Image: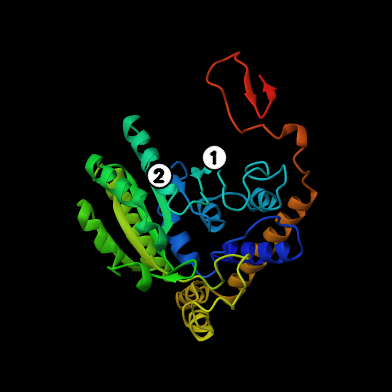
Amino acid sequence: MLRIRRFEEEAARQRNLGRVPAALHLSVGQEAAIVGACLALRRDDAMTGTHRSHGHPIGKGAHLDALMAELFGKEGGICKGRGGSMHLADYSVGIVSESAIVGGGIPLATGCAFSAKVRGLDQVTLCFFGDGAVNQGTFHESLNMAALWKLPVVYFCENNLYAFTTSIAQSHAQLDIALRASGYGMPGVTVDGQNLNAVYEAAAHAVIRARAGEGPTLIVADTYRFDDHSFRSASGKLGYRSVEEVERYKRDRDPISLYRKVLLEEGLEEERLKTIEDGVAEAVSQAVDFASASPMPRPENLYDYMFKSPLAGQTSFVAGVERD
């Protein structure tokens, strides 16, 4: 959780310095939901994220160096600088895709789970999305298909109460999102998204069900984002939530502060926590150094990785440029 928090705080600083050339959507405040769910997975399990997904790759095991370089748009990035903040992928740790489209990862996760079942594998796919995505058609179509075919997928809703500036009270006739699972004959559970252990227990149970061939689960983690929708937003000036509300969550519901207390109560010493914090700070600093030193993509390689012809030896034409 601390790696996610410090990475995103540094990413915000780097964007203010003009080194992150795109929109930046932070998940600060939602770390327990991310990490608790990812801890339930194996390395070879798959995951799809959202437009707010720097934390999800970190939770799944992606390296900070390549993630920071991707935010910088550099060749050393996780997608060689072509994806940017909202389109991170790393097949080596099972990160299939992220998408700037709200709900865009839900059908991809469903297809990924279908692929595992067809191939006879026991891999599970974890699908992250926000409360705004549950009103998209892709949500309903995908959950219906997954339930019908008992696909090994866990649908994980990070309910941070707002889709951009629209509260769930303004957009959801039924505020209990987990109840939507009953319409498709699958379990639906709501957990405290600021409680790491509660999230992990719910995710682990859902993963066990999926791996055993019992089909999908919908988990709704009640969480909260501390920052505005993105760095393109006028921070604190949009008026859709009060300053008092945000400060209350920061003070009373910060998942890192809450879990730090748990660790101390369980007997972990302050010195050990300080060592962890120092190690995270060093890793983030090294990621910035790596990103800074990484070269920019070359213009002549613009079309690399954009397409692959299944017809060996055929010639393709893209924007008037002949490509073999």
Amino acid type, callout 2: Ala
Residue 109 locus on image (x, y percent)? 40, 44
Whichever of labels 2 and 1 marks the residue nearer the N terminus, that label is: 1
Q: Residue at x 67, y 62 (%)?
A: 11
Does residue 315 sit above or below 127 in this rendering? above
Residue 287 locus on image (x, y percent)? 70, 55
Which residue corresponds to mark 1? 92
Does residue 265 sit above or below 118 in this rendering? below
Whether residue 39 is visible here, answered yes or no, is no
Q: Nearer the viewer, mark 2 or mark 1?
A: 2
| Of residues 296 and 134, the one drawn nearer to the viewer in this rendering | 134
- How dense is the environment of label 1, judged by Cα within 10 Å: few (below 14), some, or many (20 and up)? few
Q: Is residue 95 left or right of residue 323?
A: left
Amino acid type, callout 1: Ser
Does residue 240 sit above or below 186 in this rendering? below
Residue 109 is tagged as 2
